[in-house]
Amino acid sequence: MRKLFASMLLLLPLMAAAAADLEINTPAINALKNSMQARYGQLAAYYASGAVGLTRDGLIAVRDANAVPLSQRQGVNGLVSAENSDRNALYKEIATANGHPEWEAEVRSTFAQRWIQKAQGGWWYQDGGGWAKKQFQPQSSQRAQRNGRSVD
Amino acid sequence: MRITGITLALLAVFILPACVTINIYFPAAAAEKAADKIIDEVWQIKNKENAPAETPPAQ
């Protein structure tokens, strides 16, 4: 009896920990993360030039194909669609790894907000009204902020 | 012994369902934390507050 009681007490912090954190350390999630991290090396320049932007639904999209030299356009499209399939898989995988496949949409919208929040100044993202340019940090340039917003 | 039994029964009735309930609702704060962790790794963002300086000042 006492043993059972003790083991129940031991379970409580475990359950609390499970509720406090989401499981993101699975082989599938780590593989997706590594693949996206490797691809970022190629995508970074396109984020910075505004050729590629962050969408509201947690994906990325070609925003301004004219910012990409003709010879590289095919490559950019390939990068964008590969990144998006990794991102879709990631959101799904996080939801299922935590035993709630129905959380996928909420995981996606959480990521959508955080990607944009963590984007560098000068990158483009979708907000309610269309594409907007992420503001630079205060010390960089005030002027960039004022001219930053525009709609395609 | 009898009291232990009653306590156990109460625990089973109240605390276990509570644990299950917690996980039915989407844990928004935990999801945000998880997202930040993954994004930091994908974009290789150095966390200035938490990460110790990687290269200590040369002396």
Image: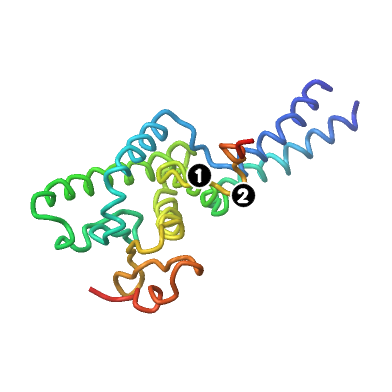
Look at discs 2 and 1 and give the one toward the viewer.
2
In the rendered image, the quadrant that contains the C terminus of chain B is top right
Name the residue at the front extreme. B59
The secondary element bearing badge 1 is classed as: helix
Residue occupying image coordinates x 73% and y 36%: B12
Residue A145 rendering spot, x and y as whole percentages: 40, 74
According to the image, label 1 marks what residue?
B37
Q: Is residue B32 above or below residue A24?
A: below
Residue A28 rendering spot, x and y as whole percentages: 38, 31
Name the residue at the bottom extreme. A146
Residue B11 rendering spot, x and y as whole percentages: 77, 38
Residue B50 rendering spot, x and y as whole percentages: 62, 45
> A36 and A9: which one is in front?
A36
Q: Chain of mark 2?
A: B
- The reply, left or right, for residue A151 in relation to residue B57 is left
Name the residue at the left extreme. A70
